[in-house]
């Protein structure tokens, strides 16, 4: 009898081992497959079981959570949704996350292991930590000024603190309310279809994901390249530039909207944006040095993140002389995001040093304990310091005496550059209006803000009037907000 009992015990032991092995197989080997199965809602239920962490601007949450009482309990709310949509993006129970909601999802959802006091134990128990908050670099007053300035027009604004790279404003219009996409019902699906079908593309972040021909604002880069290369040594010497200028190897003649551009000095040509002078300067500098300078400002960089990705701004290094001439005045294949052109202005303001822009100052646990900080940002030498001094002089002249007078601020030194960019078949579209600038209050030791504004549906259609008339006042409002003037 004892033999049968032993056999039964051994058999039961084998069954128990088999059960344990199978349980381990299911949980360890097949666990990820079950977790990723669309039919498994446990992770979604856990994810939305608690309120999501907040995104903060000037210490104030610009996001929130609403308890619906449903299975997916908490939905995201946005008190000022359209104002901050290009920064926050959306957090949808159906369509996922974008922008900061996506880049910082681990912190905001509580899933990031850095929030756990005992990470290994959390891995074993699969416990979810209390979510953290994301503190942004945005300046609320500057963000609101940019949004009000653009109004119902289509365009974008980017503003940077030159000495640090902190992004102070990031606005894109037309905008949308991310709260429309937060839930999972029929209204969310209808909003998704409507927003994606809108020809004005309200969900497109024009400040970082749309590139435009920068037009005459690119002349900041061309002038810096000419000064660095020694092609120009004196701002007031004639540049030996004909008007009109025949593009090399062609019969195409380039002209100007302004008078007195023939043989104009760099100072005069910059103030009145003489296309002929800068096209010839680009050719004289050469494609290698022009491309190198553009790259130093951030063009052709495919790795930029703020922390979400930024569209690559481009300067074509494989062009003939005629194409180089057009590229040097911000046409042909030259393309830039508003953030990129704010970086150009910031480099001038910061003595030729370009700080990599960033949007997240720090992330914090529940209770305010810092988890991570932005830390020192990478820096690159965009131009020689002596060149930056002369570029600041040129940009200041544009506001004092040239086409950028609408950006002048009492109690501050302002430098700027207007621009219009042709587009459409045969350049038939209304030109995009550009303005790039920086500002320093009279009682400040250094410039505090650099701004780029682009307006797609500008009211004017010729010369520099569009950039100076449509975009410059918006830049002025943003700079005043940052300076507190």
Image (cartoon, rainbow, N blue to C red):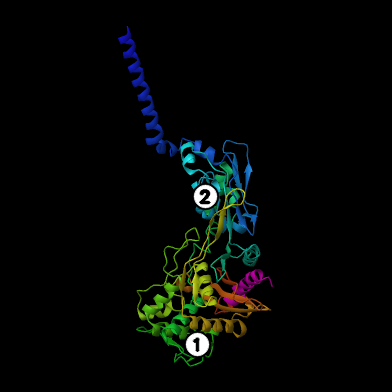
Q: Vertically, is 68 above or below 181?
A: above
Name the residue: 44% across, 92% down.
Answer: 240
State yes or no: residue 482 in magenta.
yes
The answer to whether one can see residue 431 in this image is no
What residue is pinned by disc 2? 105
Quarter that holds the C terminus: bottom right
Q: Position of residue 290 (x, y in %)?
A: 41, 78
Q: Is residue 242 above or below residue 372?
A: below
Question: Which portion, as a residue range, is magenta?
Answer: 467-485
The span from disc 1 to disc 2 (Cα, nearest Å) is 49 Å
For disc 1, the marked residue is: 266
Q: Residues within 10 Å of mark 1 (few under 14, many from 20)?
A: many
> On residue 70, which mark appears?
none
Is residue 265 visible to the viewer in this orientation of the structure? Answer: yes
Relative to 450, residue 303 above or below:
above
| Image quadrant where one finds the N terminus | top left
Q: Return the residue nearer the eye: 256 or 83.
A: 83
């Amino acid at each position: 009898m004892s033999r049968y009992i032993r056999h039964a015990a051994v058999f039961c032991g084998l069954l128990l081992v088999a059960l344990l092995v199978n349980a381990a197989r299911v949980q360890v080997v097949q666990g990820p497959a079950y977790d990723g199965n669309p039919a498994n809602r446990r992770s979604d239920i856990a994810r939305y079981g608690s309120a999501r962490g907040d995104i903060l601007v000037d210490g104030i949450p610009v996001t929130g959570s609403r308890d619906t009482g449903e299975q997916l309990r908490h939905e995201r709310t946005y008190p000022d949704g359209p104002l901050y949509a290009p920064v926050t993006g959306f957090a949808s129970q159906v369509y996922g996350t974008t922008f900061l909601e996506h880049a910082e999802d681990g912190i905001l959802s509580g899933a990031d292991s850095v929030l756990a006091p005992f990470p290994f134990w959390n891995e074993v128990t699969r416990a979810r930590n209390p979510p953290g908050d994301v503190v942004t670099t945005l300046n609320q007053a500057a963000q609101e000024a940019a949004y009000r300035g653009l109004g119902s027009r289509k365009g974008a604004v980017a503003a940077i603190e030159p000495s640090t790279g902190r992004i102070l404003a990031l606005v894109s219009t037309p905008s949308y309310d991310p709260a429309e996409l937060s839930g999972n019902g029929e209204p969310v699906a209808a909003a998704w279809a409507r927003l994606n079908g809108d020809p004005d593309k309200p969900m497109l972040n024009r400040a970082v994901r749309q590139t435009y021909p920068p037009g005459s604002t690119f002349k900041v880069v061309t002038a810096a390249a000419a000064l660095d290369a020694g092609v120009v040594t004196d701002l007031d010497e004639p540049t030996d530039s004909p008007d009109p200028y025949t593009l090399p190897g062609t019969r195409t003649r380039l002209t100007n909207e302004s008078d007195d551009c023939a043989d104009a000095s760099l100072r005069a040509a910059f103030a009145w944006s003489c296309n002929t002078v800068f096209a010839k300067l680009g050719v004289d500098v050469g494609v290698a040095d022009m491309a190198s300078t553009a790259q130093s400002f951030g063009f052709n960089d495919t790795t930029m993140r703020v922390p979400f990705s930024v569209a690559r701004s481009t300067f074509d290094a494989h062009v003939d002389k005629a194409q180089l001439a057009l590229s040097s005045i911000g046409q042909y294949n030259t393309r830039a995001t508003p953030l990129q052109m704010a970086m150009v202005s910031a480099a001038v303001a910061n003595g030729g040093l370009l700080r990599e822009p960033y949007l997240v100052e720090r992330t914090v646990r529940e209770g305010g304990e810092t988890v991570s900080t932005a830390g020192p940002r990478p820096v690159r030498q965009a131009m020689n310091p002596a060149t930056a001094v002369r570029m600041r002089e040129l940009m200041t002249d544009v506001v004092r005496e040239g086409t950028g007078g609408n950006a002048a601020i009492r109690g501050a030194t302002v430098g700027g550059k207007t621009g219009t960019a042709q587009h459409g078949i045969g350049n038939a579209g209304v030109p995009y209006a550009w303005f790039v600038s920086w500002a320093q209050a009279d009682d400040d030791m250094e410039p505090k803000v650099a701004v780029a504004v682009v307006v797609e549906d500008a009211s004017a259609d010729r010369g520099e009037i569009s950039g100076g008339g449509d975009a410059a006042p918006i830049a002025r409002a943003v700079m005043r907000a940052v300076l507190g003037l």
